């Protein structure tokens, strides 16, 4: 099942739906189901069961061309990310392979829609893309084992972890992970949450202006998605709707103005965003 947040040409109100190849099921038609993804997830197993039942109903489908998709979770409580989680990317970065997970966070204001523009901040001169698989937490959890972690995962989505790359290493020995990755619109998420049990067969691809830049299997991760959930849940409580970006592989490069970036994971979908430097902010800091 593919869960989405969407609006439609006849109703601009964002709401939760199920994406199908032949249209969208509007879950808000069920008065018992919440409109927002966070509230839907907090409603628990009953809401998921209702969504699965509705997904099989062909009546009242909204045509795909009448739908606008938003980030599936528009206001996650946490946007967590792992660095240096693919051997090829570690090698091209010239950094040693970590013995332990390397965590940072992106602020929730970074969330951007799957087809929205990427704006250049006033303080930045160059942006990189980073295509990644992203875990979406479905149930509250704390200190879970790797074996237990799957019980708390709703599913998986795509994320483009956009980075103001010159700010990342601007201050010598103190990488600015959070600042360089938390500008408005730097967390492009979607287009859906696929409720997959095992993402290990997935392949992540990036195309810039139609040219392939990244093509790598999720199975090449140093630390698997469930290892990430287990480790970070030992430090902090994970809540429904929290998202975890699982890291990127080799092929990351600086974008040129007016570039279009496609991030694709077969079985989930495609992000397509245009880098628009003319939309940058006005105040330099």
Image (cartoon, rainbow, N blue to C red):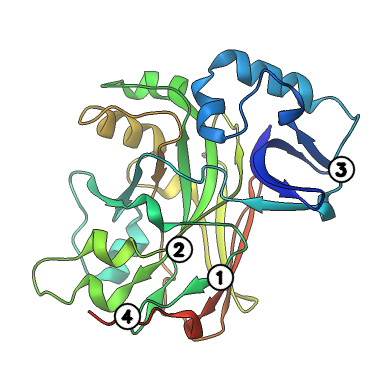
Foreground mark, 4 or 3, reads 4
Q: Quadrant of the N terminus?
A: top right
> What residue is disc 2 on?
185
Residue 117: image tag: 1
Vertical arrangement, residue 153 with respect to residue 95, above or below:
above
- Name which of mark 3 and mark 2 comes first in the sequence: 3
**In this rendering, position of residue 75 left or right of residue 59:** left
| Mark pair 3, 2: CA separation | 30 Å
Q: Residue at x 31, y 49 (%)?
A: 82
Q: Which quadrant of the figure has residue 14? A: top right
Vertical arrangement, residue 231 with respect to residue 261, above or below:
above
> What residue is disc 4 on?
124
Residue occupying the far top of the picture: 46
- Name which of mark 2 and mark 1 comes first in the sequence: 1
Question: Badge 2 local density, few (<14 within 10 Å), some, or many (20+)?
Answer: many
Instruction: Determine contact: label 2, label 1, CB under 8 Å.
Output: yes
| Mark pair 4, 1: CA separation | 16 Å
**In this rendering, position of residue 180 left or right of residue 216:** left
| Mark pair 2, 1: CA separation | 8 Å
Q: Residue at x 91, y 29 (%)?
A: 59
Question: Badge 3 local density, few (<14 within 10 Å), some, or many (20+)?
Answer: few
Instruction: Determine contact: label 3, label 2, CB under 8 Å.
Output: no
Task: Give how far across and how far down residue 247 sits, in percent.
Answer: 38, 53
Q: Is residue 247 visible?
A: no
């Amino acid at each position: 099942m593919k869960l989405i947040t969407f609006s439609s040409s006849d109703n601009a109100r964002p709401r939760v739906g199920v994406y199908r190849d032949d249209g969208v099921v509007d879950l808000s038609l069920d008065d018992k189901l919440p409109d927002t993804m966070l509230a839907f997830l907090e409603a628990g197993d009953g809401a998921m069961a209702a969504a699965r039942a509705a997904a099989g109903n062909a009546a009242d489908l909204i045509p795909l061309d009448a739908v606008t998709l938003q980030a599936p979770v528009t206001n996650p409580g946490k946007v967590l990310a792992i660095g240096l989680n693919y051997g090829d990317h570690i090698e091209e970065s010239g950094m040693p392979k970590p013995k332990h997970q390397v965590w940072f966070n992106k602020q929730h204001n970074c969330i951007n829609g799957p087809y929205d523009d990427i704006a250049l901040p006033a303080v930045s001169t160059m942006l990189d893309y980073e295509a990644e698989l992203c875990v979406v937490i479905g149930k509250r959890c704390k200190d879970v084992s790797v074996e237990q972690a799957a019980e708390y995962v709703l599913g998986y989505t795509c994320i483009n972890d956009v980075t103001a790359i010159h700010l990342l290493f601007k201050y010598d020995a103190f990488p600015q992970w959070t600042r360089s990755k938390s500008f408005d619109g730097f967390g492009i998420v979607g287009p859906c949450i696929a409720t997959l049990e095992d993402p290990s067969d997935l392949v992540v691809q990036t195309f810039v202006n139609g040219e392939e830049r990244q093509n790598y299997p999720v199975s090449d991760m140093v630390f698997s998605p469930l290892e990430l959930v287990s480790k970070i849940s030992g430090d902090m409580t994970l809540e429904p709707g929290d998202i975890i970006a699982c890291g990127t592989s080799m092929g990351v490069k600086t974008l040129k103005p007016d570039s279009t970036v496609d991030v694709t994971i077969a079985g989930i979908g495609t992000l397509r965003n245009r880098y628009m430097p003319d939309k940058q902010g006005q105040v330099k800091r």
